[in-house]
């Protein structure tokens, strides 16, 4: 099971694209609600503000699970470790709970960045390491290159996309999945099935989708600036979807709705590999 299923970390608060006062207010609200896992990245440009908000919370360091990700521009021998050290300084911590490679390398040759990630782990800059946006073949290759356990592959994961190949690879490699775009940036709300199922449990469409993700064995990151949504996204452990309802939601992957398509960013891989 993923490190994110320790304590309440399976429900993480994502910080993209927040900055400034909206970020600080959202983090404060998330902490009040009960979130203890927070996700940021060099690419987001908000590590320092996230670190300040968490430091001002008064929570003990060992209560928090802080994830950050290395920007692909820093996947060189010269830049990698200094960039991680800069991230930790910005976050006001000595060690990341989870340090990830944010994207595969543009050419798909990931050995260099994976070995640098291993080095960051070896010298104590990260308690755990993982990857993000890796395809199933990349997960298998990564497992053969990195000596330390890779605790997660953070990917786009919601009911409107078929990620069965990644789930199979996760089971095979023991690299657990974690989700971003967990409600497909609102696209799920266009499909009445989620609200209809949720109503029978006294839950919203969003809570239904998030509970489905957890029951697939996938941890999640959600983001909102609205206090009511921040709380609702956290309150998903007090019910369980039936096998029948899980199958109904599984069938929605035929929608084939993907947010991050190949070509949108230089690092987006060919997902069909």
Image: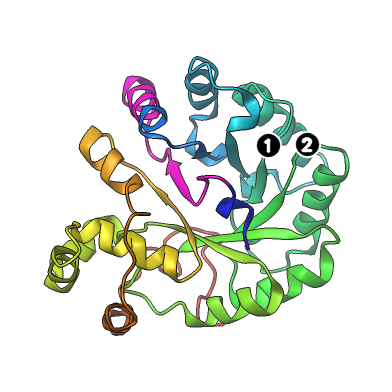
Q: How many marks?
A: 2
Q: Is residue 226 visible?
A: no
The quarter of the displayed image where residue 32 is located: top left
Q: Residue at x 57, y 52 (%)?
A: 4
Give 138 or 196, whichever is nearer the viewer: 196
Q: Which dot marks residue 77?
A: none
Q: Is disc 1 placed on a helix, strand or loop? A: loop
The quarter of the displayed image where residue 86 is located: top right
Residue 203 at x, y percent in the picture = 20, 57
Q: Is residue 10 magenta?
A: yes
Residue 39 at x, y percent in the picture = 51, 41
Residue 171 at x, y percent in the picture = 63, 77
Q: Are the residues tagged 1 and 2 within 8 Å (C-beta)?
A: yes
Q: Residue at x 48, y 18 (%)?
A: 57
Give the mark, 1 or 2, whose residue is nearer the N terminus: 1
Q: Can you identify the residue that label 2 sits on? A: 125
Residue 240 in the image: above or below residue 61: below
Q: Can you identify the residue that label 1 sits on? A: 96
- The C terminus lies in quadrant: bottom right
Give 53 or 101, whichever is nearer the viewer: 53
Horizontal side of 31 relative to 117 (left or right) equals left
Q: Magenta span covers which residues?
A: 7-29
């Amino acid at each position: 099971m993923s490190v994110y299923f320790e304590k309440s970390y399976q429900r993480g608060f994502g910080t993209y694209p927040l900055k400034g006062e909206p970020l600080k207010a959202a983090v404060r609200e998330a902490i009040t609600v009960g979130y203890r896992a927070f996700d940021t990245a060099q690419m987001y440009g908000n590590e320092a503000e996230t670190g300040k908000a968490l430091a001002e919370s008064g929570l003990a360091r060992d209560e928090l699970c802080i994830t950050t990700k290395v920007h692909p521009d820093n996947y060189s021998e010269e830049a990698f470790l200094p960039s991680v050290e800069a991230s930790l300084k910005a976050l006001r911590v000595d060690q990341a709970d989870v340090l990830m490679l944010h994207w595969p390398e543009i050419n798909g040759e990931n050995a260099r960045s994976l070995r640098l990630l291993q080095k960051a782990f070896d010298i104590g800059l990260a308690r755990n390491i993982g990857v993000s946006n890796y395809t199933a073949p990349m997960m298998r290759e990564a497992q053969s290159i990195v000596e330390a356990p890779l605790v997660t592959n953070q990917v786009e994961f919601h009911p409107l996309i078929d990620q069965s190949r990644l789930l199979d690879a996760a089971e095979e490699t023991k690299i657990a999945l974690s989700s971003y775009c967990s409600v497909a940036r609102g696209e799920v709300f266009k499909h009445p099935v989620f609200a209809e199922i949720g109503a029978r449990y006294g839950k919203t469409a969003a809570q239904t989708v998030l509970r489905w993700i957890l029951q697939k064995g996938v941890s999640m990151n959600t983001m909102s600036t609205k206090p009511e949504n921040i709380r609702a996204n956290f309150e998903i452990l007090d019910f369980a979807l039936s096998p029948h309802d899980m199958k109904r939601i599984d069938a929605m992957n035929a929608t084939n709705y993907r947010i991050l398509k190949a070509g949108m960013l230089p690092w987006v891989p060919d997902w069909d590999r």
